[in-house]
Amino acid sequence: MQEMAIRAQGLTKCFADFVAVNDISFEIPRGTCFGFLGPNGAGKTSTMRMIGCVSPLSKGTLEVFSESTAQKNMRSIKQRLGVVPQEDYLDHHITCYENLELYGRYFGLKPVDIRLEIKRLLDFVHLEAKTHTQVRFLSGGMKRRLLIARALINNPEMILLDEPTTGLDPQARHLIWDKMRELKDKDHTLILTTHYMEEAEQLCDMLAFMDDGNIIAMGRPKDLIREHLETNAIEIFIESSQRPKLLETFNTSTQFHADLGQRLIIYTRDSGTMLTQLHHDYSGIEIRSRLTNLEDVFLKLTGHQLRENA
Ligand SMILES: Nc1ncnc2c1ncn2[C@@H]1O[C@H](COP(=O)(O)OP(=O)(O)OP(=O)(O)O)[C@@H](O)[C@H]1O
Ligand SMILES: [Mg+2]
């Protein structure tokens, strides 16, 4: 049987009488990458903070490496975790080296080991040239990479990454994806939150869509798409007055469509036939054809786009 890194049952987080995480259950096998997706305020960070043993559960049970996150186990669990928080929490007035050194000491590493680890980790995230630069002089992408290095100082079995690539340019994002793949190949368990569908599709073995504190769908990225929608999405930029006739033509009562203001999206298995007919009946309007993706699934399940509130 596959060993579980996380077992959560009825996990709930309340802030006074507001329920931020509402009775969610999930399991994460060791050595896999699990992603939480959802709009702002869905409860992703609140869930991550409970896993990271920095926020107590309001209800439910949570096991990390088969140990409950009760007070008495927190220290031993934290020793096995690396955390890349959503906010940077770096000390901006000391150098990259000193930031990592402080963290290494916190985990009780020997000075000689800390020195070697810092060199290895700054190489790993391509920041060796900034070793003795104060953090306030780093770019946003460099700070995210330093946070990843910091999260790895105790050689953790599991790494929690809360929006590790938000705000990064594509090159920096791809570098972080490569590093995450390397970590997964070395059997680390990764738990990730992200607003980027491509990131989730590329890295995650399993995903949970969250909305209003609930898990509204969970599964492998490809399975989620297949289970919920047809394979092709046709985006049609058409005025609303023309939409009822078009929807009737394509018998959209049997296939899902989404009305997104300027755009109408129809999901279909047979895009060829539909495109031919569209170009014939509605020549001159903008039409785009693409494969259905996770964002479409989220749209179907919640009625709004992932970044709508972002
Ligand atoms: N310390 C707190 N006190 C009160 N409410 C909180 C606290 N932390 C989070 N919340 C509320 O809980 C809900 C979930 O917040 P959370 O940070 O988990 O969302 P998220 O899914 O991570 O969103 P984002 O994508 O914006 O990071 C929000 O409505 C938020 O305002
Ligand atoms: Mg968050």
Image (spheres, grey):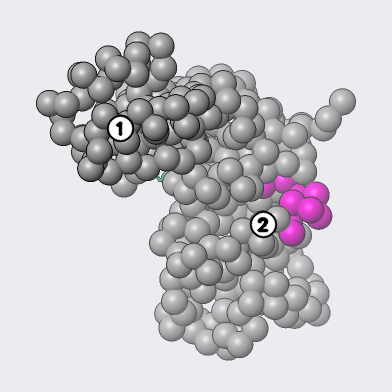
Span of residues in magenta? 182-190
* Vertical side of 295 occupied by 25: above or below: above
Q: Report the amino acid beneath label 1.
A: His
In this orientation, which residue lies closer to the viewer: 214 or 93?
214
Q: Residue 23: image x %, image y %?
A: 50, 20
Secondary structure of the residue carrying numbered label 1: helix
Report the residue at 38% width, 39% height from top.
Answer: 306
Image quarter for residue 236?
Answer: top left
Secondary structure of the residue carrying numbered label 2: helix
* Vertical side of 53 occupied by 141: above or below: below
Number of marks in the image? 2
Q: Which residue is mark 2?
A: 180
Camera-side mark, 2 or 1: 1
- Is residue 289 visible in this depiction of the protein? yes
Mark 1 residue's CB less than 8 Å from ligand 1: no
> Is 277 on the left-hand or right-hand side of 202?
left
In this orientation, which residue lies closer to the viewer: 267 or 69?
267
Name the residue at the left extreme. Answer: 241
Placement of the N terminus among the 4 image quadrants: top right
In this orientation, which residue lies closer to the viewer: 36 or 305?
305
Name the residue at the right extreme. Answer: 1
Q: Which residue is mark 1?
A: 280
> Is 106 on the left-hand or right-hand side of 112?
left
Report the residue at 50% width, 58% height from top.
Answer: 165
